[in-house]
Image (cartoon, rainbow, N blue to C red):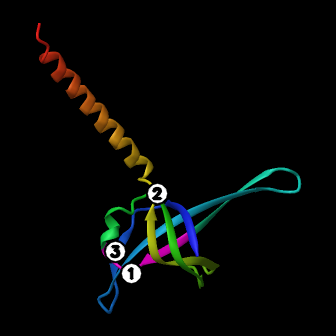
Amino acid sequence: MNITGRLTRDAEVRTTSQQKQVVNFSVATNDSYRNKQGERIEQTTYFDCSYWITPNVVKILTKGTLVELSGRVTARAWTGNDGEARAGLNFHTSQIKMHGGSRKAETIPATAQAEKNKVTAQETDDDLPF
């Protein structure tokens, strides 16, 4: 199964009692449709994800990053501290494909490029022969 969505928080590495490392993160997927009355209905689904292959991906899995994940889904149920029944979806990730940086990270290259252009323009003015 494949899902595409944005990370809702930065990924974290955890170590199990058997000394294996797992990367945990959360992804939100959006879907929309029109009901019989023609109203647009937006629906967001949240997945708790785990990735066991390498912990190094934690560096690039930051909040807001758009990812496409391959793997399998399992459902889990539990009782919360308030006594309410809860359920969630776990996505056991086997492959991660990046589709761009986080919204915050996308603004950084633009700022860096502007600074580079500013420096280049100053150097050009100094190099004029007259």
Mark pair 1, 2: CA separation: 21 Å
Q: Choose between 13 and 110: the one closer to the eye.
A: 110
> Which amino acid, mark 2?
His
**Which dot marks residue 13?**
3
Q: Compared with residue 48, is residue 123 higher up or lower down, i.e. above or below?
A: above
Residue identified by numbered label 2: 99
Mark pair 3, 2: CA separation: 22 Å
Q: Residue at x 11, y 11 (%)?
A: 129
Which region of the structure is painted magenta? Answer: 47-55
> Which amino acid, mark 1?
Trp
> Mark 2: few, some, or many residues within 10 Å (few <14, many ≥20)?
few
Q: Residue at x 32, y 36 (%)?
A: 111
Report if residue 50 lies within the magenta region: yes
Residue identified by numbered label 1: 52
Quick check: marks 3 and 2 in contact, CB under 8 Å? no
> Mark 1: few, some, or many residues within 10 Å (few <14, many ≥20)?
some
Report if residue 38 lies within the magenta region: no
Quadrant of the image occupied by residue 11: bottom left
**In terms of secondary structure, where does tag 2 sit?**
loop
**In the image as oriented, which residue stretches furthest toward the top?**
130
